[in-house]
Amino acid sequence: MNWPSRTPAVTHPKTGKALGEFGRIDRYFKPLASGFPGARGLADDAAVFGVPPDRELVVTTDAMVAGVHFFPDDSPGDIAAKLLRTNLSDLAAMGAAPYAYTLVTALPKSVGEDWLAGFAAGLGEDQARFGIALAGGDSVSTAGPITLSVTAFGLVPKGGAVPRWGGRPGDRVFVTGTVGDAALGLQIAFGKLEVADDSARAALLRRLRRPDPRTTLGPRLVGLATACLDVSDGLIADLGHLCEESGCAAAVESGRVPLSCAARAVIGTDPARFALALTGGDDYELLFTAPEDAAPALAGLSAETGVPVTAIGRLVDGPAGNVTATDPQGRALDLPTRGWDHF
């Protein structure tokens, strides 16, 4: 991995002097706060949030570190998109609609104006796409790698936040979109997986760098889903987390797990690559449970929002957190790992 090349210090266009912390805020981040009155133009020590009486505030925080969550030479626009979208995915998993976010950047002094401009532009594009605005944050320098953190706020009907712990034996297990693309994309980025098809290669790398948070479907799961989370550590591992909280086990029919055309082309008949798709993580799709009789309503929501929803198994009685996956012939799959663990 290559660290960002040293670029000239950010300077004021008239004086030629270094902008410094507040100059950077004025140029790159204050415009991102213009759509949220509670940000108060980033002129005060804190933001002010007003919450409608029939809503509750949902709060999530995710951090990303260069060399751990992204390659240091990834484009700043891609980094910004992944940073914001992973947090929006957490909101969607709780059934919350995006409201506002705060941002902390810890940047080496070698990070210059081009990087900041690209990063701010990436945030601006996604703010417009997902209907959210910057409310404040902090900016510091560091001698270490680029470290970024977002705290995102969402709104959910009072008492309606979808938990991880509400699943019950007999509930069906559903997942949105497709899984495995990001895990395969990461292997491509590391140079561990050769893909001759340029279109498939580009699709898998795109899913790694720019996940698609299900912000349209997530809020519509309130009152339908019994439990929900997003797939960040891997499908099997995250379903295990849901089962641990719900006090039950799960059975996954691996033949039903949705794969993209690109993933299918790359996996072929290789069982190791298929296992990677089930356990690799970084998909940021919604993994949720719902009663059997919710299937027609979910099919309608899928058609209305354009977000594919696939039933892949069900919750069952058994040791809390235990997840079994079977092949199309009903034989248990031997998976080398359940998913990602930072520690």
Image: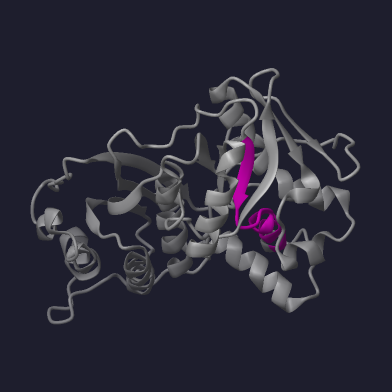
Residue at the outermost top position: 319
> Is residue 161 in sight in this rendering?
yes
* Membership of 177 in magenta stretch: yes
Q: Residue at x 12, y 47 (%)?
A: 48
Relative to 183, is 95 above or below? above
Residue 234 percent location from the top left of the image:
64, 43
- Res. 110 image quadrant: bottom left
Write the start and end of the magenta stretch as one range.
172-188
Residue 270 percent location from the top left of the image:
88, 54
Left or right side of 255 for 146: left
In the picture, which quadrant includes the C terminus?
top right
* Membership of 170 in magenta stretch: no
* Residue nearest the observer in this picture, 16 or 189: 189
Left or right side of 338 for 343: left
> Is residue 104 in sight in this rendering?
no
Q: Residue at x 48, y 41 (%)?
A: 224
* Residue nearest the observer in this picture, 163 or 274: 163
Residue 330 percent location from the top left of the image:
88, 38
Left or right side of 135 for 338: right
Q: Number of marks in the image? A: 0
Relative to 2, is 53 above or below? above
Q: Residue at x 72, y 46 (%)?
A: 278
Residue 301 percent location from the top left of the image:
50, 56
Relative to 46, is 122 above or below? below
* Residue nearest the observer in this picture, 2 or 202: 202
How are the residues colored? one colour
Q: Residue at x 22, y 65 (%)?
A: 24
- Res. 168 image quadrant: top right
Relative to 174, is 264 above or below? below
Left or right side of 236 for 136: left
